[in-house]
Image (cartoon, grey):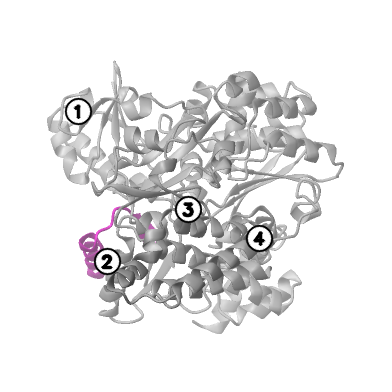
Amino acid sequence: MSIKIFVPQDSAALALGADVVAENVLIEAKRRGIDVTLVRNGSRGMLWLEPLVEVQTADGRMAYGPVGPEDIAGLFEANFHLGGAHTLGLGLTEEIDYLKRQERLTFARVGITDPLSLADYLALSGFQGLHKALTMAPTEIVQEVTESGLRGRGGAAFPTGIKWKTVLGTAAAQKYVVCNADEGDSGTFADRMIMEGDPFVLIEGMTIAAVAVGATQGYIYVRSEYPQAISVLNKAIDIARQGGYLGSDILGSGKAFELEVRKAAGSYVCGEETAMLESIEGKRGIVRSKPPLPAISGLFGKPTVINNVISLASVPIILDRGAAFYKDYGMGRSRGTLPFQLAGNIRQGGLIEKAFGVTLRELMVDYGGGSASGRPIKAVQVGGPLGTYLPESQWDTPLDYEAYMAMGAVVGHGGIVVHDDTADLAKLARYAMKFCAIESCGKCTPCRIGATRGVEVMDKIIANQDRPAQIELLRDLCDTMLNGSMCAMGGMTPYPVLSALEHFSQDFAQAVHEETVAGEHHV
Amino acid sequence: MNPAFIHQQVAKIIEQHRLRPGALLPVLHGIQDELGFIPSESVIQISLALNLSRAEVHGVITFYHHFHTTPPARHSIQVCRAEACQSMGGENLAEHVAQRIDERAAGLYDVHPVYCLGLCANAPALMIDEVLHARVTPEKFDRLINALGAHS
């Protein structure tokens, strides 16, 4: 009987040589006359173990990792294809603590299936949510999503059901569903892992959204930095269309939905929903003023559902298992799970899907195993480049939208970037301003000019030129950007800057302090 | 590149996408994928075909970091400069790349910053041509470049 061996083709695995590993598995198996079926799965999300090679045995899938191309001969020598012991052996994949302690709802299939196998998808409850949705009235679908408590996973945390209700209630000859897959935040890769590892779940979620609101055309706006995701999605869309899950008559329901991937072009601000619409329309990615809401006048002026990849990919399980099942996870008004992405200076980085309420310390210590450098962790940025830097005193607050908001932080898209004690928070604050200056769309003054002035002020602070007055100026500038910008780009850049100043003031005052000690400081 | 050839290629790509709503980005991607860059002389051709002004087409090309109007070097190197990579020595790597490439003949490599390749748990990362590389040390980078040099 043929032995199934899994070598991921997730970008993280590819970037660590998974293609050569896969090639060597085939060459070595052939040389030894062993009948092997190679499956290119998604990643299990234990990214420090990539490439993580798995073998199907009678007891379940056995994991080996991280596997380099040079390890393959030794692995076959140790009969790994029969589950044999090897120094890279990790035991049964499902029993690995990191994975076992997660609550995988949205990522239920990622890493398990061949992303482009419709049979694999169907075997693990695939398209059950769509089948159910097609038996329901549009208002019932919207009601189910509303009751589940699902909120926008892109970062804004707006209730998904309410957004859908507005689009459903707006009469128009043409409506759209747009998936925001412009995952530009540093420290985030959950969208990419869904698109590369389980593209059908996104297609199913978008189709359910379309059926619910009466849209017939959908777009997935994917960043150009994700060529693998674009390639997998395009193939998956073709397969879904051939299977009758997309097209002019979805599963014989008489309802139509077409889906197209649109490739972005390297602009961070196009992750802002209205700039994204401009970009899909073929224009510069300039933020629109709201109102009108995109739900009423969105893409090409038509009512448009805009949701993040993870929001849409969470819809199928909500429809399949019911709102109550999903709502049962989480805390307070943050219901369900969030795929946290543990990144940066961390020993065991990866994707951890957990119910809301877990703390940063649990994620970084219990899962992450501390910093990669072995040095003490100093600051953690949660929620992307526009998220705050959290000092140790805040690591025990449960990850919940409201609890984070109460301390001036954001959960955002669940990206967690860890910095050890060598990090200079003044430099990182300068970087936040610099990034905003590079990526600002230029429409509003606080963001366009404010960010450039912010870099200048930070340079003066770092060079210790008239520091107390410059810090005051920085606070003033942040106040203007925070309250006067049109979107989150300029409006949230102050978050990392002010939190760095607030919690790590020693990094801004080092030279001042030294001078005071030397008796040379004049205010 | 021969102007007639450029004109013909651009016309072919425009024809493929002309009827798509919001066709400009797909057209520009198509041209850059085919020719390696977007020649300035194609702006007028695109604007006429899509019924846009030259200013609009020029504005879009220059707004997006991804589009280039000059012929690319033989290899492109995109070094991630975002926070997660910074936390793992990304700035040192970027300096090393700049130094190392400086020593080499111009026209062979384009080095660009990129803000996140989505490999944040295996930082620092960079992309050489269309191939991603994670956990890149200066030594690993030198090996990659040497391997590239072997058949370029």
The residue tagged 4 is A279
Q: Which amino acid does label 2 sit on?
A: Leu
Report helix, strand or loop for mark 3: loop
Task: Quarter of the image for the N terminus of chain A: give it.
Answer: top left
Q: Which chain's residue wears label 3?
A: A
Q: Does mark 4 fall on the same chain as mark 2?
A: no
Q: How far apart are marks 2 and 3 (CA)?
A: 22 Å
Q: Range of the magenta residues?
A: B126-152
| Left or right of A96 on screen, residue A446 | right
For marks 3 and 1 on the same chain, the one whose residue lies earlier in the sequence: 1
Number of labelled discs?
A: 4
Residue carrying label 2 = B148
Specify few, some or many for label 2: CA neighbours under 10 Å numbering under 14, 14-19, or 20 or more: few
**Depicted A315 relative to depicted B80: above or below:** above
**Relative depth, front residue between A407 and A444:** A407
Q: Where is residue A50 in the image (x, y as percent from the top left)?
A: 30, 41
- Please tell me which residue lies in front, A313 or A127: A313
Tag 3 residue: A226
Identify the residue at image location x=44%, y=63%: B114
Q: Which of marks 2 and 4 is in front?
A: 4
Magenta span has B143?
Answer: yes
Neighbor class of circle 3 (other Cα within 10 Å; few <14, some 14-19, many 20+) is many
Query: Label 2's element?
Result: helix
Q: What chain letter is assigned to the residue under label 1?
A: A
Element type at mark 1: helix
- Secondary structure under the numbered disc 4 in the rendered image: helix
CA gap, disc 4 and disc 3: 17 Å
Q: Position of residue A38 (x, y in %)?
A: 33, 34
**Amino acid at the residue labelled 4:** Ser
